[in-house]
Amino acid sequence: MNEEIKLKKIHDYLWEIPKAGHMRVPGRVYASESMIKDIQKDRSLEQVVNVAHLPGIQKYSIAMPDIHWGYGFPIGGVAAMDAEEGVISPGGVGYDINCGVRLMKTHLNEEDVRPKLKELISELFHRVPCGFGTGGKIKLSKGDYKSLIEKGTKWAIEKGWGEAEDLERIEDHGTFHGGDPDAISERAYERGKDELGTLGSGNHFLEVDVVDRIYNSTVADTFGLFKDQVCVQIHCGSRGFGHQICTDYIDKMISYMRREGINLPDKQLACAHIKSNEGRDYLSAFAAAVNYAWINRQIIMSSVREVFYKVFKIGPMELGGQLLYDVSHNIAKFEEHNVNGRIKRVCVHRKGATRAFPKGHPLIPEIYRGVGQPVLIPGDMGRASFILVGTETALEETFGTSCHGAGRMLSRNEAVRRAKGRDLFTELEEKGIVIMAKGKRTVIEEMPEAYKYVEDVCDVVHNAEIAKKVARLRPIGVIKG
Amino acid sequence: MDYEILDHTADICVRVYGRSLDDLLRNAARAMMELITDREKVDPSQEIEFKARGETDEEILVHWLDEILFIHHVKKMVFRNFESHPVSKTEIQGKAIGENIDMERHEIRLDIKAATYHNLKIERVDDRLKVDIVFDI
């Protein structure tokens, strides 16, 4: 379907879509030769082109190797807008504002955990609410909302969900400033009031992994990773609160565009100038959802720690349940970047893409400043996930950004067709992976072969040097909504 | 055929037909609900009224579906059927007929976050209206 979109090869892992028509900048896609052929089969390159039309976009409309067909922006899309003249696009962040991943390390190794793995997964499954309509135990009052919007993750720490040192290991120390309770609709409050500490469904998950390969021992040491170490990955976002904020503001942006006479190839790219009232209001509501998502992952991690204490009859010192890092992969951030030789303040939209800042960057925690920022790339539930580290090349070429996951390859319908007659639960168990899920259908739709192999995606990123591989994780226990 | 499910890599796309805008809205709501659960298993015992407004037919359609999703999420209900009556060119009065979710009887197939405007265009094909809707999952 994308045959009419011409691609120019820049190097083995980078392709350019030359500027044409009303594109303001060229497109750039990170992919191997074989991947690019697959990418051309759906409409994701057309979406890279569409994003290049947004007012104020700088340098390139960029796509990561896990790019796939989304709505508006492609998933795996990156676009930096001039902070003064440019626009903010709620669709460029996505409905699940601040969807992201965190990884908790432990002092345990696979041998310690295997004998009690089933009990561990079962306890986690019962402790962490997941699936549609499963509310959490926390009921938020308007006062709670006001407080959490202002304080971010600090609010959760004050309530006893975690330790102060966790804050050091979250982007922006877990607090996104600028939230305004008045910029949020009653509907968003309503949807979010009982969903804190819940996983949700779809591609969200909680996973127990084992470090099975180290690629860079110096960085792994700094990250506190070792072979056979048990880790836990948590992937989720801002739940109904964020979804509703996105829904509300896409409408406001559509009215704004009509009024201002802004025409874009796809209405889902709806945007407003950052300096407009609509732009400012969205950013104030968005900030609240960013905090909500961090708190959500924080509460889940706190539950995970407690489950480990209970199942293994150990305390915090023996568990060593320390956060490695928490990354946001549906986000817009104001950052300073070099644009054609000038340092410029831009708003970087990362829609299914992860920040990957290099060593020495002031925005990464001091503990990692000597090596670079941890980049967490979850794969599918049957094969692997990766931990990478940010690089200088990423800062130069991609506004300090890398990929975010494996990227879907099959539609949900196709996954269901291929799974016919198979028992995926048994297949995973035979590979030593214990899985518990609310919906059987979710497991089918999320089956490993529905995704590109995450190692292929990470190899492109590694070879293009927009992040470097540090360690590989192998799943041993999975919880799905 | 009132609707069919199309392939979309990351999310879900449905193609919906209707004789008029309000017929299209009813069919779109049924298609969406069929993605969420088996409508046949929903008892039509409760009615919820709502309104959907918009400057264009496409906006009315997205607002209509988002209204139903909001009720589904917040009231934790599923629906078997829908009624729609035009109030004006920019407003539709709607009714969703169904019941509270009972996890024993209702399998929730998909948790749909929203209906999107992605490439959304209501077209007239012969004597019918046709639209492809992408939902965010």
Image: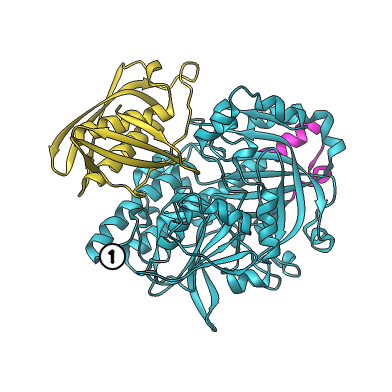
Q: Within the image, what quadrant is residue A109 found in?
A: top right
Placement of A434 over or under A53, stated as above or below: above
Instruction: Residue at the far front: name it.
Output: A3
In the rendered image, what is the letter of the chain coloured cyan? A
Q: Horizontal placement of A332 versus B129: left or right?
A: right
From the top left corner, tell me how far across and down residue A442 is, in percent.
56, 31
Q: Horizontal placement of B87 versus A388: left or right?
A: left
- The residue indicated by pointer 1 is A262
Q: What is the span of residues highlighted in magenta in the rendered image? A: A303-322
From the top left corner, tell me how far across and down residue B90 is, in percent.
16, 44
Q: Does residue A318 belong to the magenta stretch?
A: yes
Tag 1, which secondary structure?
loop
Instruction: Residue at the far bottom: name it.
Output: A341
From the top left corner, tell me how far across and down residue A472 is, in percent.
76, 50
Q: Which residue is drawn at 48% across and 22% down?
A: B107
Placement of A91 over or under A110, stated as above or below: below
Q: Residue at x 48, y 47 (%)?
A: A96
**Residue sitting nearer the eye, A69 or B92:** A69
Tell me if mark 1 has few (under 14), some (14-19) or many (20+) residues whose alpha carbon lies within 10 angstroms of its own.
Answer: some
Q: Within the image, what quadrant is residue B67 found in?
A: top left
Q: Residue at x 72, y 45 (%)?
A: A384
Q: Colour of chain B?
A: yellow
**Residue sitting nearer the eye, A58 or A239:** A58
Q: Quadrant of the C terminus of chain A?
A: top right
